[in-house]
Image (cartoon, rainbow, N blue to C red):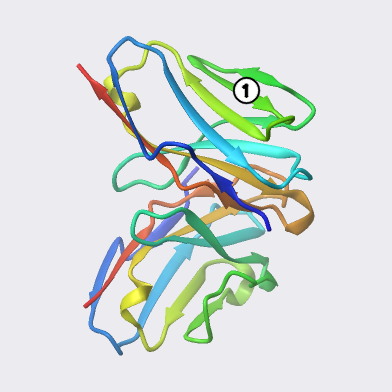
Amino acid sequence: GESVGLHLPTLSVQEGDNSIINCAYSNSASDYFIWYKQESGKGPQFIIDIRSNMDKRQGQRVTVLLNKTVKHLSLQIAATQPGDSAVYFCAELLYNQGGKLIFGQGTELSVKP
Amino acid sequence: EAGVTQFPSHSVIEKGQTVTLRCDPISGHDNLYWYRRVMGKEIKFLLHFVKESKQDESGMPNNRFLAERTGGTYSTLKVQPAELEDSGVYFCASSQGGKSSQHFGDGTRLSIL
């Protein structure tokens, strides 16, 4: 069946270091992936997305890498800041099912000052 | 523009009682989705409206859950009677098209005692 999951539930990094958050998916037919950030008491907030015909996409301080061979997705955050502390979810958007999202479990990122 | 708003932000009720959650999507967004996150697990899809029509309710747990979107504007999600396992955070999201980015509300934290 479809599933999107994460390798690690928690990640702790030093302020200024780079963070890498990983995600594995199982639906080889998926064609669109999104990373969300969820802060305490808030809803998921869009960070960056990538289509399956790409292997890398860069935003401001964030980069998403897609490896379709091993069905792996990662989010890299450069120069991690305390404000980056949150739970990060990867999600698969299913175009052929009305655009519903299939989420992974989430990784909690803690940034130490 | 105003974002997706959800009410209440937090609800505490006893097992067996009824609770109704409300979601006001972004004005003009035809697509409205309900999701929930239970006890630190992944965020799971519940159902999808296009205007007032239910497009996909495959994620609804059982018939104790009833979602409506009369008039195609705001939506309600009623749980009757509530059970302990219904505790969690219920998120609503809206988008213009089924392939567009979904904007999330801050969720309703539901606690069943």
* Residue A69 placement (x, y as % from top left): 74, 29
Residue located 54% across and 52% down the image: B26
**Which residue is nearer to you in this view: A99 or A70?**
A70
Residue located 60% across and 60% down the image: B32
- Figure quadrant of residue B109: bottom left
Residue located 31% across and 78% down the image: B84
Mark 1 Cα-neighbour bin, 10 Å: few <14, some 14–19, many ≥20: some
* Residue B11 placement (x, y as % from top left): 26, 70
Side (left or right) of A93 relative to A17: right
**Residue type, mark 1 in image:** Leu
Residue located 30% across and 88% down the image: B17
Judge whether B35 appears above or below A107 on screen: below
Side (left or right) of B44 relative to B8: right
Side (left or right) of A66 relative to A13: right
Q: Quadrant of the C terminus of chain B?
A: bottom left
Helix, strand or loop for disc 1: strand
Judge whether A67 appears above or below B8 on screen: above
Q: Which residue is mark 1?
A: A65
* Residue A60 placement (x, y as % from top left): 51, 15
